[in-house]
């Protein structure tokens, strides 16, 4: 069984880290990059949303309380643009905000200060759940497509049988 310190990120995992605190950005970026993640940082919501729309990251780490565009507002806009797992970061464990984040559909809510070795399991768990949901959605779409094809084929067979006078 591997320990948290042995868990290393796949090099292709791209994280968008959004926080208005430059010290938090620098610390988490350095630690996550050392763990093998490709980390892109933004210090404001508007820039983060534009980057997300252009090139969605595999996962987003997002501060709740930022000026101009609040974290929940940004998370809502990101989820509507391109669905990716979002982990909310906050220095506060405000119950109503946690509830709103959960209702919005974020993958997790972590209270700062947080160390990178504490963050990695949450990132990996969120990415694993996202992969599972994506696979289920793909299977569901394939199943719907198969059912529709079967319906069309059954209708065509029925028409041919009727025209040929077959019962």
Image (tube, rainbow, N blue to C red):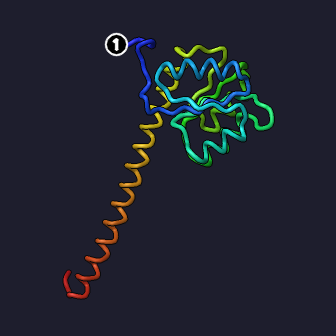
Element on which disc 1 rests: loop
Question: Which residue is painted at 55% across and 29% down in the image?
Answer: 39
User: Can you name the residue that lies furthest to the right here?
Assistant: 68
Q: 59 or 29: which is nearer to us? A: 29
Identify the residue at image location x=55%, y=31%. 15
Quarter of image, res 51: top right
Q: Is residue 3 above or below residue 37?
A: above
- Who's the residue at 54% across and 38% down the image? 57
* In the image: residue 16, left or right of residue 23: left
What is the x, y in percent for residue 9? 44, 24
- Residue 68: horizontal and vertical position, in percent? 80, 37
Seen in the picture, residue 134 relative to 61 is either above or below; the reply is below
**Pointer 1 residue:** 1
Circle 1 crowding by C-alpha within 10 Å: few under 14, some 14–19, many from 20: few
| Mark count | 1
79 over 19 or under it: above or below: below
- State the quadrant of the N terminus: top left
* Residue closer to the observer: 161 or 104: 104
Quadrant, the C terminus: bottom left
Q: Position of residue 26 (x, y in %)?
A: 64, 20
Q: Quadrant of residue 136?
A: top left
For image coordinates 62% across by 15% down, the residue present is 114
Left or right: 41 as drawn, with respect to 136: right
């Amino acid at each position: 069984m591997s320990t948290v310190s042995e868990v290393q990120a796949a090099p292709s995992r791209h994280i968008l880290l959004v926080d208005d605190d430059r010290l938090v950005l620098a610390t988490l970026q350095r630690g996550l990059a050392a763990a093998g993640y490709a980390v892109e940082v933004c210090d404001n919501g508007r820039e983060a949303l534009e980057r997300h729309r252009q090139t969605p990251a595999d996962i987003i780490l997002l501060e709740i309380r930022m000026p101009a565009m609040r974290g929940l507002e940004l998370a809502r806009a990101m989820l509507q643009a391109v669905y990716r797992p979002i982990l909310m970061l906050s220095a506060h464990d405000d119950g109503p905000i946690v509830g709103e984040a959960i209702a919005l559909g974020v993958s997790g809510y972590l209270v700062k200060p947080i160390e990178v070795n504490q963050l990695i399991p949450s990132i990996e768990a969120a990415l694993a759940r996202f992969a599972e949901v994506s696979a289920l959605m793909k299977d569901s779409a394939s199943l719907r497509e198969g059912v529709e094809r079967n319906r069309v084929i059954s209708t065509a067979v029925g028409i041919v049988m009727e025209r040929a006078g077959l019962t």
